[in-house]
Amino acid sequence: MDTYFVTGGKPLFGSVPIHGSKNSVLPILAATILARGESVIHNCPALSDVFVTAEILECLGCRVQWHSGTMTVDATQLTGGQIPDVLMQEMRSSVLFLGPLLARLGSAEMCCPGGCALGPRPIDLHVRALQRLGATVNEEGGRLRCTTRRLHGRRILLDIPSVGATENIMLAACGAQGNTIISNAAREPEIVDLQGFLRSMGARIWGAGGSTIYIEGGQTLHAGEYTVMSDRIVAATYLCALASAKGEAEFTCADVRTVAPVITSLIEAGCTIRSAAEGRIWIRSREPLKAIRPIYTAPYPGFPTDAQPVLMAALAGGIGKTTFVETIFSNRYSHAEGLYRMGADISIRQRTAEINGNPFLHGAEMEAHDLRGGAALVVAALGAQGESRITGLHYIDRGYENFEGDLSALGAQIVRVKESVETQMGANTQEPVVAVCAAGGQ
Ligand code: EPZ
């Protein structure tokens, strides 16, 4: 496994761009199979989750090309069928292929996406909604087999504003006969981006960003072209890294509106933050971060659960007591183990974490257990005295295009030591691997 060596205590200075959004591009790539032709996706981040999705598209018969930030997907020859288990298990969001496969081909087969470090990740809302739209879903032996003669538009009320379920319904409804109305839909900016891409394909869809989304089915879609939004969680991570390490930096290609709750918290903690035109966010942090009002994670536009670990890591090196309540996932404090090793004072009871800031955190050996928890360990290490060693970087590579490169550009002392080549031959590489398709019998 690759390892980060971070020497903390050094303020950061400089300017870094924010790359395209993982959580926007993944559903958009799934949407490309709704139509024949070659779709073009700009500002596509170079992330392992994106390359896994490209492998899935190739296994389904698509031709995928990648060239410096633009991915093209030709879904003309979509053969569909079964998504290889090894790819399904690598990435939960592969479940987003259910809707478009049913819409385009009338069938989809995959293994149930596993739970992950965040706790159980059920897909009952996805399944119930697809059944309501006219799909037959058989779940046996951990596999989902879905078929439909024809999807029909329906009114669908979600019990909770699930991001993935909202996206799956949008994708399926585009291939349904008749109109669909989604109530209690997720309002995340990534949903608005998916609507934008679907519109570029000729879909008639309104309301994304609000709680009710309208899809007029029966449209013949064509390949689309779209530029993916900036990644708001990467922006939140980098702002927290600067707040933790101290210094002054500017982040470009950012969308300040989508990180507003995190900016509010960092200003309350004592940072100076200004946003300028054309997506620039400037931050300065000089003093130890102060305690802030309790943070309750919530669906958008509330405080994003994905930013909870990195804000906690920054505040762990500050002063005073802050409470976090994680309302979305049942097990999203895996980063606390590493922060403890650095001398952090954190007490956790079920979904509540109390942080007593310690401005004298020290370097430690730590392991990432999930994507944002791994980023949080780096955020804390940058503000700690001494050297930290962090493993489990494959989690971080899922959501950050060039984490060590961007932080180094701000002056951070962070080095990635790659595992020796011979032992890495079997590890995940970031290049699409066709071999899996053969294994999957495509
Ligand atoms: C998306 O996951 C994001 N992933 C997550 O980001 C993010 O944390 C999450 O939304 C919440 O904002 C992508 O977009 C690829 P949900 P998703 O369905 O769609 C429960 C990251 O770090 N639920 O909104 O899986 C679920 O267990 C990742 O980038 C059901 O009960 O999240 C959770 O408690 C992590 N049944 C809550 O809803 C279902 O059928 C919210 O989940 C579906 C979800």
Image (spheres, grey):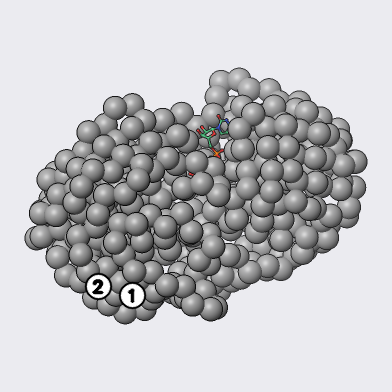
Q: Measured from the top left, where is residue 400 in percent x and y?
A: 40, 60
Q: Measured from the top left, where is residue 213 in percent x and y?
A: 75, 46
Q: CA distance from mark 1 to mark 2?
A: 7 Å
Residue type at numbered disc 1: Ala
Q: Which mark is residue 261?
A: none
Dot 1 and dot 2 residues touching (CB under 8 Å): yes
| Disc 2 CB within 8 Å of nearest ligand 1 atom | no
Q: Measured from the top left, where is residue 399 in percent x and y?
A: 43, 56
Q: At 31% across and 49% down in the image, what residue appears?
A: 292
Q: Which residue has dot 2 on it?
A: 247
Q: Measured from the top left, where is residue 231 in percent x and y?
A: 50, 61
Q: Is residue 11 visible?
A: yes
Residue farthest toward the top in the current orientation of the protein: 140
Q: Tell me the quarter of the image containing the C terminus.
A: top right
Q: Which mark is residue 249?
A: 1
Q: Secondary structure at mark 2?
A: strand
Instruction: Between residue 200 and residue 243, name the one nearer to us.
Output: 243
Residue type at numbered disc 2: Gly
Q: Left of 237 or right of it: where is 73?
A: right
Q: At 60% across and 65% down in the image, what residue appears?
A: 228
Residue 165 position (above or below residue 244): above
Q: At 86% across and 48% down in the image, what residue appears?
A: 216
Q: Left of 181 or right of it: where is 289?
A: left
Q: Left of 374 or right of it: where is 184?
A: right
Q: Left of 350 or right of it: where is 181?
A: right
Q: At 69% across and 43% down in the image, what residue appears?
A: 211
Q: Please identify the quarter of the rendering in which residue 82 is found.
A: top right
